Amino acid sequence: MIEALAKFLIAYLVGTVMGGQIVGRLRGGVDLRQHGSGNVGATNALRTQGKAFALAVLLIDVLKGVLAVLLIPKLPGPLVEAQPWPTDWQAYACGVGVALGHCYPAWYRFQGGKGVATLAGVFATVLPMALPWLLGGFIVVTILTGYVALASVSAAVLALFYIACVDARGLFSAAGAFTAAMALLVVWKHRRNLINLARGQENRFEKARLLHRWLNR
């Protein structure tokens, strides 16, 4: 348990390294929390700061998800003679830690991003076969509707569908528990967007509605 907690906390700290804050400081002190939706993620960066800024934010947030589950579980434990902690559980626990660090960073009053980019990095590493489902669902819903929040929630639901119906391990496994927990986190972080969507008040990313733009030429 000491090793589990230590690695979880390290992953959490990695998660608190916010791509939006890093790129903002490098670009003259831009604070995404003062622009647009106030979110520090790539979507708000794209809407308010442009493509290059958003791409840099996206890369940092994805990369920290990859590094957290790829490297941290390999760190030597403090009690080498103790019963080893299963490797898959280590990776999933670190995935939860880095996602929570991104969504609730202690240094920023627990007001962070929504975890989608960081979780994409995590899933690309621990469940790579699920990644096409996530990305495919995200891209299709975004192109059809222009609602990034809806696309994010759809990707989370598809991840859950994949692990429950396609992956041999199923929901009642370490992978299933991790996927279910992260799907719930994504839905929770987008709850206000879903409420706004139901009320017809959600902001639509019109430039992403490629099918709509093509049909209206």
Image: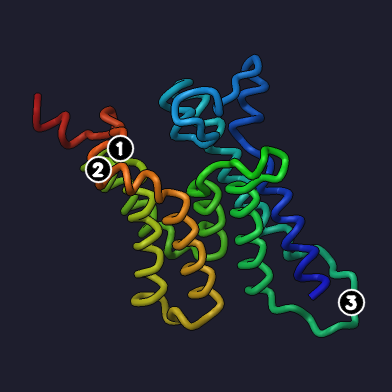
The answer to whether residue 184 is left or right of residue 100 is left
**Residue 56: % across, % down:** 56, 31
Between disc 3 and disc 1, the foreground one is 1
Residue 206 position (above or below residue 150): above
Mark 3 and mark 1 lie on one chain; the one further toward the N terminus is 3
Q: Residues within 10 Å of mark 3 (few under 14, many from 20)?
A: few
Residue 49 position (above or below residue 4): above
Q: Residues within 10 Å of mark 2 (few under 14, many from 20)?
A: few
Element at label 1: loop
Q: Amino acid at mark 1?
A: Glu
Q: Residues within 10 Å of mark 1 (few under 14, many from 20)?
A: some
Locate residue 96: give its quadrant: bottom right
**Residue 42: % across, % down:** 49, 35
**Gap in angstroms between the C-alphas marked 1 and 2:** 8 Å
**Residue 122: % across, % down:** 56, 57
Where is mark 1, residue-wise?
Answer: 202
Where is mark 2, residue-wise?
Answer: 199
**Gap in angstroms between the C-alphas marked 3 and 1:** 52 Å
Please name whichever residue, 156 or 121, is drawn nearer the observer in this view of the structure: 156
